[in-house]
Amino acid sequence: SIANTSCDPNELLCSSGATGPMCGACKTGFYYSASSRGCEPCNTVDLSSALIAAVVVLALAGLIGVVVIYPSARRPFLWVLSLPGIHPRHAVGTLKILFSTYQIIQTVSWNLDLQWPSPFSSLLAALAILQLDLPIECLHSGSTYFTQVYFVSTVPFALLLGVWLVFFLRLWLDSAPPGGEGWHPGTFALRRGKAVEDGRLSAAMDRLSTPSRTGNSPDVAE
């Protein structure tokens, strides 16, 4: 009879693969999918392909950053600017708008639990890699919800470390003398001091060229 049938209480409250208080975690062998907004079995995802796609996206982002920062690196891509209707400022602005719009749509979908129609939902699922929606829980058979918690907690520190590495790399490249002897703290200090003096001289010249309210020339003595 129905009264004698044993059942798992979690299965009555949570969707398939979900467990924990308020069904806020996935069972072992499942991962949370942002596109479906639910727990999916690990055997339904190709983890190697997802990681390769993430590496490709990060590499493209780094390449774009190098091209934007260093003008000499733009030469292999100048043919793109020769295409009709392509302007550097307009192209960068359009990409920023598209990426921001995609981020907003994904955020609204998660917060309001929206179900988009088939063509658009397939597009969002294909672009989910841009959200770094990776099945971290499926890295190995012993992975749990805490695996993703630890991984996500280290991401800000990894990004901060990357920012500092880029900063020191640019510092080394900008401070290297023309002869190629490499970076030296004294070289950086001298160039920084010269930049400060140039800034003071420029400010003094601006004050000289701008008439004061009383009609007298400003005092440039420091």
Image (cartoon, rainbow, N blue to C red):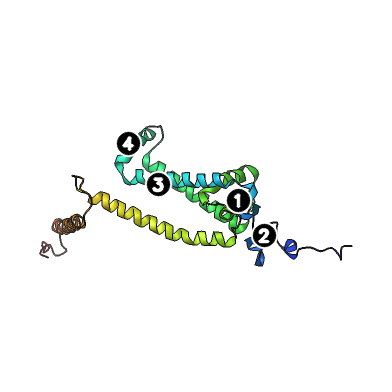
Q: In the rendered image of this protein, does residue 91 appear above or below residue 211?
A: above
Can you say which quadrant of the picture contains the C terminus? bottom left
Instruction: Inspect the image, locate mark 2, and give the three-letter code of the amino acid beneath it.
Output: Ala
Question: Callout 1: helix, strand or loop?
Answer: loop
- Find the distance from the CA under tag 2 to the CA under tag 3: 36 Å
Q: Nearer the viewer, residue 113 or 181?
A: 181
Q: Which mark is residue 35?
A: 1
- Residue 55, image x, y percentages: 47, 46
Q: CA distance from mark 3 to mark 4?
A: 17 Å
Q: Secondary structure at mark 3?
A: helix
Q: Position of residue 84 (x, y in %)?
A: 41, 32
Label 3 environment density (alpha carbons within 10 Å; few <14, some 14–19, many ≥20): few
Give the percent coordinates (x, y) of residue 35: 60, 51
Rendered image quadrant of residue 167:
bottom left
| Label drawn at residue 146 | none
Residue at 57% across, 44% down: 126
Could you give the CA–CA distance between mark 4 and mark 1, rounded to whole angstroms? 38 Å
Q: Tell me the kind of residue under disc 1.
A: Ser
Sequence-wise first label, 2 or 1: 2
Nearer the observer, disc 2 or disc 1?
Answer: 2
For the residues bearing labels 2 and 4, Cβ distance under 8 angstroms: no
Q: CA distance from mark 3 to mark 1?
A: 26 Å
Q: Are marks 2 and 1 in contact (CB under 8 Å)?
A: no
**Nearest-to-viewer mark from 2 and 4:** 2
User: Which badge, 4 or 1, comes first in the chain's sequence?
Assistant: 1
The residue identified by callout 2 is 18
State yes or no: discs 3 and 1 in contact (Cβ < 8 Å).
no
Circle 4: is it few (<14), some (14-19), or many (20+) Cα within 10 Å? Answer: few
Which quarter shows the N terminus? bottom right
- Pointer 3 or 1: first along the chain: 1
- What label does residue 62 carry, if any? 3
Q: Check disc 4 and report the residue beneath it.
A: 75
